[in-house]
Image: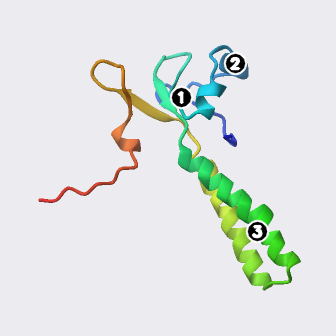
């Protein structure tokens, strides 16, 4: 389940839909399923990135569960502090990356694809 730490803005027009508009447009269900949603203002497609949620989840796990357990088990204090710091940095990085990504439609408009600047495929071209 996504944890929204920042307000969601359309990457195309920077419009921030209100909670009422999100409820009218049935935004929550497609966002939870990682499906494309359309902006109420410009009708362009966008999607919530999965990487941001993973970073936040890992950070919460490290900071709120693993680090206190290490303190409780009388492990090295520096290790617990290091894991807590890793979790805090992961949460901050996840919150910074938590923005809707623009999706471009190809040709006939049936298949939404992720725009090249937001693609995670870093393939190198060989000569």
Residue at numbered disc 2: 23
Q: Secondary structure at mark 3?
A: helix
User: How busy is the neighbourhood of tag 2: few (under 14 within 10 Å), some, or many (20 plus)?
Assistant: few
Residue extending farthest right: 72
Compared to residue 49, the image places residue 44 above or below, namely: above
**Mark 1 and 2 residues: CB-CB less than 8 Å, in contact?**
no
Q: Position of residue 9 (x, y in %)?
A: 58, 31
Q: Secondary structure at mark 1?
A: loop
Q: Which mark identifies residue 33? A: none
Compared to residue 80, the image places residue 64 above or below, namely: above
Residue at numbered disc 3: 66
Q: In front: mark 3 or mark 2?
A: 3
Gap between marks 3 and 2 measured at Cα: 36 Å
Q: Position of residue 85 (x, y in %)?
A: 70, 69
Which residue appears at 27% of the width and 22% of the height? 107
User: How busy is the neighbourhood of tag 1: few (under 14 within 10 Å), some, or many (20 plus)?
Assistant: many
Earlier in the chain: of badge 3 and badge 2, it is 2
Earlier in the chain: of badge 3 and badge 1, it is 1
Taking depth in this image into account, of 39 and 50 the one nearest to the observer is 50
């Amino acid at each position: 389940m996504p944890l929204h730490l920042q307000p969601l803005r359309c990457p195309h027009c920077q419009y921030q839909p209100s909670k009422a508009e999100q409820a009218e447009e049935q935004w929550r269900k497609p966002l939870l399923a990682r499906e494309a949603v359309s902006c109420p203002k410009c009708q362009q497609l966008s999607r919530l990135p999965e990487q941001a949620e993973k970073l936040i989840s890992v950070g919460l796990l490290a900071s709120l569960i693993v680090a206190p357990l290490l303190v409780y088990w009388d492990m090295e204090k520096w290790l617990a502090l290091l894991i807590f710091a890793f979790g805090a940095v992961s949460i901050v990085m996840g919150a910074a990356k938590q923005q809707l990504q623009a999706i471009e439609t190809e040709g006939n408009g049936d298949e939404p694809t992720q725009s090249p600047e937001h693609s995670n495929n870093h393939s190198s071209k060989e000569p």
